[in-house]
Each structure stands twice: as C-alpha cells, then as structure tokens.
Image (cartoon, rainbow, N blue to C red):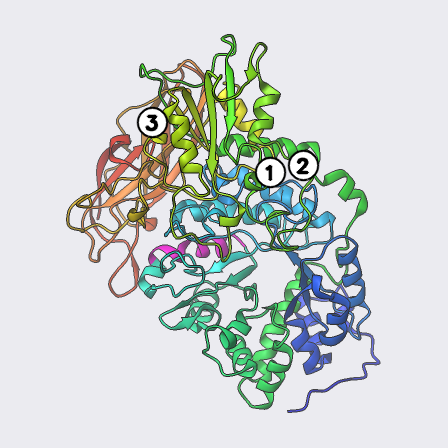
C-alpha cells in the first residue's frame, strides 16, 4: 500500500471552526489527512532529541522532555505543518514539575499517601498542574496506581502503597487536581493513570519482569484503582513494561480493549510506556519486526506510541502487508484528535507564559502547601524514652547539644527522591539540579529551628544524636531494584556505632521505600518515617522534633522486620499453615495504617445503624473517639471489613473507608463511616464480582493490626 504524500484542500476547513461540534470537526480533519500524517499523530517522541527534525520527518503528534522556549518552538513548528495540528506536550510531573529548575517538588507519592488526605493530594496535583502549564506542558504522566508488593522493586516510592482502596481514593483526588474544571481548563493538565496494569507484581523485585498474575488476581487487587481512576474522569492510561501469562501489556487485547474500553467505557487515549512497541521486537522478542509490533499495538487498542521512532515505517509496512487496517489506524487517530479538540488546543495551543512562570513557579502559596504536605506525610513510628514516657517532642527550655549524622542528613537529592532534577531521567546523572536554596534538608531544618542555648555538636560530645538513614538515588527508581532491603554503603555499621554510644537517638528515615533496620535501631528513643519528604521536608521534620507540629501520618505500606517476609502487605489471602516462619516472625516491624502522635486517641465500642443489610443498603458504623492527650491533634480512623466465609479464597481483611478527624485536647466525637454493601465484593472462582451473603465483621481503629481494632458483627442477606 502506498502512502499518500499530499492532498489539496482548497475549501475552508471545518475542523478549524470552533462553533461546530467536536465530532464533526474531527471527522473533517481525519478526511483530509494522508496516511503518513495519521501515523505521525500517533507518535510521541523525546523532544530533547531534536523536536524540529522529528516534526519535519514524522509530523509527530506529541512530545515529552521539552518545556519553556523549546515547548513554544515545538508548538509553533507543529502549527506550520500542512494541516496545522497542534502538538500535545507532556512530561513526568510525578510529584511536582520534576524537571523545571526551582519548581515545587512535593513529597513522593509514597510519602504523600501517608497523609491519608485526598483533599491535600488534590491540592498538590492542582499546584503541579499550574506550574507545568506555565511552562507549556499540558499532560503529566501521573498518578502511578501500581500496588507495592515486593519492596525490592525500585519504583515502590512512586506508588501510593499497598492497599487498593487507599490507592484508588488518592488517585482519584490527584486526577481531579490535575484536570481541574475540565480538559479545557487553561490551568489544567491531562492526567495519566499508570502503569496499566500489574506492573508492580515482579519476580524477585526485578523491574519489568514477567508478572505472574491471573485475570482473577488482576480483578481482585490491581484493576480496582484503575477502574476508580477511569470513573473519576482520567483521560489517559499508560501501559506497563511487563508481560502476564506470556502477553506483554502493550499487546494485551483483553486488558486494553475488553476491560478498559468495552467494560469500563473509557473514552480517553492509551499511551505506551517508553519504547514499549520497540521492546516487543528487541527485548521481549514476541514480534519479528516493527511492522508486526506496530500492528499488534494498534489492534489491541493503543493510541499514542511513546519513544519508538521505528513505528513510523513499521506502521506503514503493517498497512501494506495487511497486518492492520486503515480503519483501525483511523480509530486511534480519531481518539487523539478528539482529545486535542476537547482540550481546546486548536483554539489555544497552550504555549508557555513567562509572566506565569515568574508568578506561579515555587510561589509562596505552593511553598506553604509543600510544607503542609511534608508535615502530614511524616509518620512517627516510635516514641519511647527509657522510662517508658514519650521522648518527643524535645523540650526547648532544656538546652541540649545535638549531633546530626548520616549521609542523608544533608543530601538534597536523597530528600527529593526520584523524578527530580538530579535523579537522572531527563539529563543524566551529571545534569542540572534544583537550586540548593530551594531545598531544606534535615540539617537545614534543625539548624533553622534550634532553640536558644542549644548547639549542634560532634557526636562524641552530644547529648542527643539525630541519625538520618535511608537510601540514595543510586538505589531508587526504574531499573534500580535492589537485591536486599538492608541499609547500604556502610549505614548499618554507622547506625550500630551510634547506638552503641549509649546516647539518646532520634532516627529519621529518608528513603524511597521501607527498609530493614538493624535491631538496635528499632530500640532508638524515636523513629520518624519521612520517605522522600520533598523540598521542605527538613523543616517539617524539625517541627516534629521540637513539637511545633503534632505528627498525624499513618503508614500506607507495611515496614518489614526482615527481607525474607516479602511480600509483607497486610491484606494477604488467608489459609496458610502457621502464623510465623520457623526461624523468624511474619509480623512486620510496623504495620499498614500505623502511626503515632503527641495526642492520645481513645476508641470506644463501634455501633451499627443496622446489623442486617441487603445488597442495596450501606454499612454505617459509628465509633466514639476521644482525644485524651494534652494537645490538639488529628487521627485517621480506619474501617476494615472481614467476610467470614467466602466462596473463593480471599483476603482476611480489607480497608473500605477512612476519615481524618481533628480534635482539640480533651474533645470527644462520634465518628461515622459508611460504605455501600455493593462495595463489599469478592471476585469469585469464575472471575465475577459478587457480594455474597453471610456473616461479616466491621473493624474500626488506628491501624490494620488486631490490637488496634475493635469489631462488631453484621450480616448481608
């Protein structure tokens, strides 16, 4: 089949008439396009590798890794092509505008998820969208909806943790924040739910390895967050790198067409991850050439082909060989053009705005939001002096000499984590970094809030040691899975030496994912989990240490006691023999949902509005909650459900609702939580989503572990 190179269109193009219905405009434009122009619209290329040449060669429809003046130049070049179809510009705004120097870099997704605060995450996404839009970007590859499983996987820090329900709630919040009032909102960016689906279920923690997942297991745990994102209006999904049951995600027709489009009614676009089509040929070796790979991608429902220049000739060859039809090609192009129409790019191609760059990037409001996000994300894991009383907060009126030690105590990149300047994805490891002045490290924060009469001393002379442990950028992210979860680069030895000094120790964990701590470290007077807390994380940690902030974060992921516990997530299927390993416990060091504070919250006995429910009813639970401490504080009340007998094996308990409750010292309230009975489903042995009748338990409390929960029975009839 020959590719047409030109068509003469003398008439006034209807597709440029904004008064016409978008569908009519799209069909008019599609009818004017050559096959080469259609193929080009499906190509998303790395703009840092020469966007002007790529527009000339391919009429590429989308670019990533360019912004500012380059973004404007790419847009203008696309508008000068024969049909003037505007380019859609994207980038990895994972937890802030990652690669714009000085932009607001928030805590990572894993850190943010420990806030259990959907409203906060919506605000974070909204701020990120405003900063990205100011620089000419209209599409972010976020949020990540992968479930954390094997903690050795290098991308755990990009996830919302281990629970499908919490994952879906926070993902929906970020989608709302990114997309704002709608796709034509001038301050909004297109959100992307990724990596669809099951990418995080790796073998040995190895990135992009085969994921041993049945369709039932996908429907039980990995698909629900994506279905939630689709229902919240997310208009872009990205495929994963892995394969399942021998089928790479990018050519999984069941996953991409039958579930996403036909079952869920998804009307947005599906983009492959970086060179996923090329990987079908070069890495996974399931296609003989780029023609076969291009045809497989289109036939299975992909629309935008990321970072595969060979798709241009491959798709043309596939058409000539009859491996894919032009109607299938048109189907994908139609979706891409429809999205561009809905975003209003034909009327406003969304160039950057230097005035907004000056007024929006890292503005005071965003820095304050960043600090609030860091505060809410911190998790106080341990707080016990030798006499059993709380060790933190430190009393400012009692001067101390403190030492701040550990390689992450003053490392901006370790604190920002992956997907930031300096992490290497866009410019390489030696590329530019965010200005040092934009990052408050742990040492910076402690220095800035050091009370009068206090000093920062050598560890040998100090009364108190702040020991900052974790991982560094060499052990974080894509392709950087680790063989162990132990502290690297001599940190374990340093920790043992510090603990052996017999001084009071506050441990701060600055890490991309849960790590295994030496036993002596677990006995420190205080442990603060920060994960990668963002640009203002050091300030937030210091505020917690000195009592200016009452920590309220709860773990969204279990922290293991030893690496052999993998996987350690709380909602595993019941039925194993025994409750421990022969040599070690199966209990985590710190469980999902756990977190301490400077308040003391007392739970009463939960009560049900009705203990006999039909499938059309809602489970309504109320529980008395009292702040019996001496400080105002916030508690995250968690509701779990156990289905006592299921027709197929199922998780022992599952999170179904939660609420953040703020109470003054001494204040009491009744906390009400509700969940439709229709959400108390399992996936049965036939792969069907069903709510089964019988006995259930509702459990309310402060974490997922038995000791922190109070239960009440109910029945579904």
Q: Above or below — where is 374 with respect to 676?
A: above
Residue 350 location (% of width, % of height): 75, 55
Q: Look at the magenta stretch and give its main secondary structure.
A: helix
Q: Secondary structure at mark 1?
A: helix
Residue lying farthest to the top in this orientation: 397
Q: Secondary structure under badge 2? A: helix
Tally of numbered tags? 3
Upstream in sequence: badge 3 or badge 2: 2
Q: Residue at x 40, y 35 (%)?
A: 493
- Residue 710 colored in magenta in the image: no
Alpha-carbon span between mark 3 and mark 2: 34 Å
Image quadrant assignment for residue 86: bottom right
If you read the primary sequence from the N terminus, does the residue marked by circle 1 or circle 3 appear first?
A: 1
Left-right relation of 428 to 17: left
Asked whether disc 3 touches disc 2, contact meaning CB atoms under 8 Å apart, the reply is no
Does the residue at mark 1 contact the one at mark 2 (Cβ under 8 Å)? yes
Q: Is residue 337 above or below residue 603?
A: below
Disc 3 target residue: 523
Residue 514 image position (x, y, % from top left): 41, 42
Residue 438, horizontal then vertical, whole percent: 67, 35
The front one of 406 and 628 is: 406
Disc 1/disc 2 C-alpha distance (Å)? 7 Å
Residue sitting nearer the eye, 43 or 138: 43
Q: In this figure, which residue is indicated by the disc labeled 2?
A: 436
Which of the marked residues, 1 or 2, is nearer the chain's N terminus? 1
Point out the stretch of residues depicted in magenta.
220-233
Distance from the alpha carbon under mark 1 to that under mark 3: 27 Å
Number of residues whose C-alpha sits closer than 10 Å to that of mark 1, classed few (under 14), some (14–19) or many (20 or more): many
Residue that numbered label 1 is attached to = 412
Residue 289 versus residue 390 in the image, above or below:
below
Category of crowding for the residue at label 3, using alpha-carbon neighbours closer than 10 angstroms: few (below 14), some (14–19), many (at least 20): some
Residue 197: image quadrant is: bottom left
């Amino acid at each position: 089949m020959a590719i047409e190179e030109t068509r003469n269109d003398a008439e006034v193009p209807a597709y440029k008439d904004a008064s016409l219905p978008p569908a009519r405009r799209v069909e008019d434009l599609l009818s004017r396009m050559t096959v080469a122009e259609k193929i080009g619209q499906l190509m998303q290329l790395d703009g840092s590798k020469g966007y002007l040449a790529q527009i000339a060669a391919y009429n590429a429809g989308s670019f990533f890794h360019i912004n500012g003046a380059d973004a404007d130049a790419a847009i203008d070049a696309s508008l000068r092509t024969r049909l003037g179809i505007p380019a859609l510009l994207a980038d990895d705004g994972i937890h802030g505008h990652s690669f714009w120097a000085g932009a607001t870099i928030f805590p990572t997704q894993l850190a943010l998820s420990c806030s259990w605060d959907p409203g906060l995450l919506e605000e974070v996404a909204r701020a990120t969208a405003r900063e990205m839009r100011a620089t000419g970007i209209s599409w972010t590859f976020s949020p990540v909806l992968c479930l954390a499983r094997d903690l050795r996987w290098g991308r755990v820090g990009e996830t919302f943790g281990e629970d499908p329900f919490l994952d879906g709630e926070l993902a929906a919040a970020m989608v709302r924040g990114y997309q704002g009032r709608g796709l034509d909102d001038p301050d909004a960016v297109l959100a992307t739910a990724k990596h669809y689906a099951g990418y995080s279920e790796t073998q040995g923690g190895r990135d992009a390895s085969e994921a041993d997942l049945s369709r039932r297991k996908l429907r039980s745990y990995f698909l629900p967050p994506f279905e939630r994102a689709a229902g919240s209006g997310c208009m872009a999904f990205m495929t994963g790198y892995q394969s399942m049951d021998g089928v790479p995600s990018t050519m999984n027709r069941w996953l991409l067409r039958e579930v996403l489009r036909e079952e869920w009614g998804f009307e947005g676009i599906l983009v492959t991850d970086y060179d996923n089509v090329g990987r079908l040929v070069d890495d996974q070796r399931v296609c003989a050439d780029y023609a076969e790979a291009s045809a497989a991608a289109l036939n299975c429902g992909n629309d935008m082909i990321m970072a595969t220049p060979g798709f241009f000739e491959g798709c043309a060859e596939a058409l000539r060989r009859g491996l894919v039809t032009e109607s299938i090609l048109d189907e994908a192009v139609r979706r891409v053009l429809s999205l561009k129409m809905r975003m209003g790019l034909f009327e406003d191609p969304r160039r950057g705005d230097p005035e907004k760059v000056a007024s929006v990037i890292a503005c005071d409001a965003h820095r304050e939001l960043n600090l609030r996000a860091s505060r809410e994300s911190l998790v106080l894991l341990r707080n016990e002096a030798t006499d059993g009383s709380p060790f933190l907060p430190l009393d400012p009126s009692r001067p101390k000499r403190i030492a701040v030690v550990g390689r992450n105590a003053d490392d901006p990149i370790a604190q920002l984590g992956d997907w930031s300047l300096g992490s290497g994805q866009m410019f390489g490891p030696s590329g530019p970094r965010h200005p040092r002045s934009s990052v408050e490290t742990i040492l910076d924060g402690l220095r800035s809030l050091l009370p009068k009469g206090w000093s920062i001393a050598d560890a040998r002379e100090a009364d108190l040691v702040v020991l900052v442990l974790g991982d560094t950028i060499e052990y974080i992210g894509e392709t950087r899975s680790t063989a162990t979860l132990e502290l690297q680069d001599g940190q374990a030895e340093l920790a043992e030496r510090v603990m052996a000094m017999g001084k009071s120790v506050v441990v701060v964990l600055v890490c991309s994912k849960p790590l295994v701590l030496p036993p002596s470290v677990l006995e420190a007077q205080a442990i603060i989990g920060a994960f990668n807390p963002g640009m203002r994380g050091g300030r937030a940690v210091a505020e917690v240490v000195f009592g200016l902030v009452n920590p309220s974060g709860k773990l969204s992921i279990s922290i293991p006691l030893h690496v052999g516990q993998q996987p350690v997530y709380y909602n595993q299927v019941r039925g194993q023999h025994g409750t421990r390993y022969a040599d070690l416990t199966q209990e985590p060091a710190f469980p999902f949902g756990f977190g301490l504070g400077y308040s003391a919250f007392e739970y009463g006995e939960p009560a049900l509005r009705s203990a006999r429910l039909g499938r059309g009813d809602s489970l309504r639970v109320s529980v008395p909650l009292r702040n019996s401490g001496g400080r105002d504080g916030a508690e995250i009340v968690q509701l779990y459900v156990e289905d006592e007998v299921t027709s197929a094996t199922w998780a022992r308990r599952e999170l179904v609702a939660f609420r953040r409750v703020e109470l003054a010292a001494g204040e009491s309230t009744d906390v009400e939580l509700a969940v439709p009975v229709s959400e108390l489903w399992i996936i049965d042995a036939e792969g069907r989503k069903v709510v089964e009748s019988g006995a259930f338990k509702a459990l309310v409390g402060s974490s997922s572990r038995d000791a922190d929960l109070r239960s009440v029975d109910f029945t579904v009839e």
